[in-house]
Image (cartoon, helix red, strand yellow):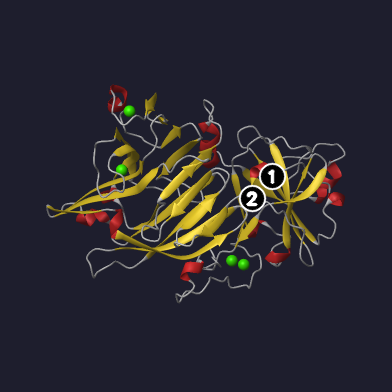
Amino acid sequence: MLLPSVDSGAKEDQARAACPSAQKKKTLTRQEDYIIVRGRELRKTRNEKISNLSLFSSIAGEINPIPFQVDEVNPEGEWVLPMISPSFKDRPIEPDRDDDDGHLDENDELVFMVRDSGDRLAPDHYPPGAVAVDEIRLEDPIDGALAWVYLCSFSGKPPLSDVDYVIYQTLLDKTEQITSSNFKIIYSPGLSNSPSSMSIRGSKNILDRMKFRLQIKILGIPFSLDENNFSGELSLYKDGPIRVIRRIRSAIQLTKTFRTPSAAIESILYNNVSIVPVRIKVLVSMKWFKKILRVKTRVGADFQNMHGWQVLTNVDPRWLQVDGKMDETEMGVKGEGFNWFLAKGPEGAFIIRAVLDRRPDGSFQESPLKASLYYMDDDTRLDPPESVPGESPQIGYWMDGVQDLAKGTFYVYAVMYFIKNYQEGIEANYLKILDQPIKLCVD
Ligand SMILES: [Ca+2]
Ligand SMILES: [Ca+2]
Ligand SMILES: [Ca+2]
Ligand SMILES: [Ca+2]
């Protein structure tokens, strides 16, 4: 256990014994992380009305409200999404509700960005009018650097920040548009599982489409599925200052008249990060089918308008040149152990990371799934169905091990980080968001 050092902070640390610290000034330098705090950690403000809460930080001697949101989670563990897209107002969809009528409870999530954190506050400097305050200390596990934010409850409407990091709009043609300072992403009604258009910091649309290709052989009889077999329908969303969560009901259309029961797929979009977690429920161990079933799965992003961009992957130290042709370097890349790729272009850069060994909360998951890189930069190579002919380039992975899945629930997810100014090695700042997450202490 850490003991408070003997200085002027010692007395106040005894009052706030859970997270002692002699330090007062923010030393944490991380800029890109989003922070999620569960209601169960927030002992002072828990059970308060969410509409009476605000989050504060102290920067350069000034104490101000900072952007945040509280996303309620229902007793089944699903996000409460209270908004219906205007295009779907005529459908029999009810907005979600938590079971406690808008109060902060154990499983609800407080969300904010690390860049808005600040110095430590003495209790006599807490915002005037705050009736309950949770002090949240953020700590970088790499170097022990610290920062703080303060969740405060008021007896009525609190002072709030007017910063909005990500904006959701429905356009007249029923497409959904999500914008931040880093991207503009459009979802079309037909293919609403995945974006139909993506612009990076003002670039042209770089996306042809996201591809999900499944080749299955049952008793030697082949059939295949692709993303066109997934029907998706927007059900509900939430648009807050920190993130947009949109949920699609998706089913696999196996024949014209038969579709599987629908599953919910959520996309989570922050200012600089987009996450799509997919929960796979395996009802019967795949081992029983191992003799009769062969599955090949390819997941990827098929791009366009990217000539002149360069790509770096975690499986090879060489930069690959996107020019519509495969050169020797590109053909020589070995794909095993694929984890992420980075693309940099004139307007900005991004990383896409495939996560197969962890749950969305960061905990480790035992899984037979393995990824190996799929990279193809060839404008003449067709890979239908697609909207723009050619793989220009297509970057993704083969997913191996599907036939070794045991009974249970597995997570597969993709995380995309948007980078304003790429500098060599900057990817480490983004990879540590998942690999060395910021530690929290609440008092
Ligand atoms: Ca709840
Ligand atoms: Ca609640
Ligand atoms: Ca090339
Ligand atoms: Ca294409």
Name the disc covering residue 244, or none. none
Q: Mark 1 belongs to which amino acid?
A: Asp
Give the class, few, some or many, for how many residues have Cα within 10 Å of label 1's Cα (few <14, many ≥20): some
| Residue identifier under label 1 | 116
Residue 141, percent from left and from top: 61, 37
* Left or right of residue 100, residue 295 in this image: left
| CA gap, disc 2 and disc 1 | 8 Å
Q: Verify CB contact (< 8 Å) between mark 2 and mark 1.
A: yes
Q: Quadrant of the N terminus?
A: top right
Q: Residue at x 31, y 23 (%)?
A: 329
* Left or right of residue 218, residue 119 in this image: right
Residue 221, placed above or below residue 320: below
Give the class, few, some or many, for how many residues have Cα within 10 Å of label 2's Cα (few <14, many ≥20): many
Asked if disc 1 is less than 8 Å from ligand 2, the answer is: no
Q: Secondary structure at mark 1?
A: helix
Q: How many marks?
A: 2
Of residues 291 and 371, which is closer to you in this image?
Answer: 371
Q: Mark 2 belongs to which amino acid?
A: Phe
Residue 237, percent from left and from top: 52, 63
Rendered image quadrant of residue 228:
bottom left
| Residue identifier under label 2 | 112
Residue 182, placed above or below residue 90: above
Residue 33, percent from left and from top: 59, 42
